[in-house]
Image: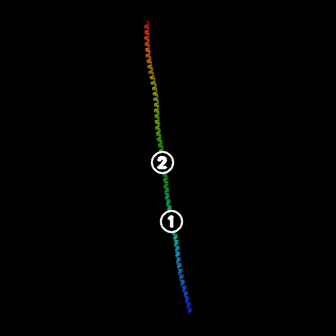
Amino acid sequence: MSIVLLCVLFVLIVLLYVLFVSIVLLYVLFVSIVLLCVLFVSIVLLCVLFVSIVMLCILFVSIVLLYVLSVSIVMLYVLFVSIVLLYVLSVSIVLLYVLFVSIVMLYVLFVSIVLLYVLSVSIVLLCVLFVSIVLLNVLFVSIVLLYVLFVSIVLLCVLFVCKCVLYCCHRVSTQLQLMYNIITI
């Protein structure tokens, strides 16, 4: 009987040991299930994190696209302003060309007026030259006439002297003749 008791005791100890091992295994199983749940929750949280990262990337891409859109709008505005400024520049160039043409036309008008003035002065100088030539001719004719007058006066003087000499000669001759006649008588 003591052996039976011992066997029973031994079986009981073994059963207790099995029960203890079962409890430990049950505890390990429970911990494993809990860890599995934690793992599942971690996987879910990781998925949520991944989705959040994807959503953040989508948000970032959206912000970048919004920025690109705003930059595109600004670039369109800059393009419009550039076109307007190009139009203003072309109008300015046309107005500058018109101003240049006006200045050139004004210069041409001024040169024409100066040339007209020079032409009128040339005509006046030509008239003065003509009058000078006429006056020079008149002067020359006057000098010639004065020369002729002088020559005439000189000739008249010579003629007068010759007449005086002739008269003196005639008188002397007459006196000599009278004296000869008187002597011959």
Q: Position of residue 182 (x, y in %)?
A: 42, 8
Residue at image mark 1: 60
Residue type, numbered disc 2: Leu
Q: Secondary structure at mark 1?
A: helix
Q: Position of residue 121 (x, y in %)?
A: 46, 36
Residue 153 lies in what quarter of the image? Answer: top left
Q: Residues within 10 Å of mark 2 (few under 14, many from 20)?
A: few
- Circles 2 and 1: CB atoms closer than 8 Å: no
Residue type, numbered disc 1: Phe
Q: Position of residue 72 (x, y in %)?
A: 50, 59
The residue lying at 43 percent from left, 13 percent from top is 172
Looking at the figure, which quarter contains the N terminus? bottom right
Give the Cα distance between marks 2 and 1: 51 Å
The residue lying at 49 percent from left, 51 percent from top is 89
Q: Residues within 10 Å of mark 1 (few under 14, many from 20)?
A: few
| Apparent side of residue 133 relative to residue 11 in the rendered image (left or right) | left
Q: Which mark is residue 96?
A: 2
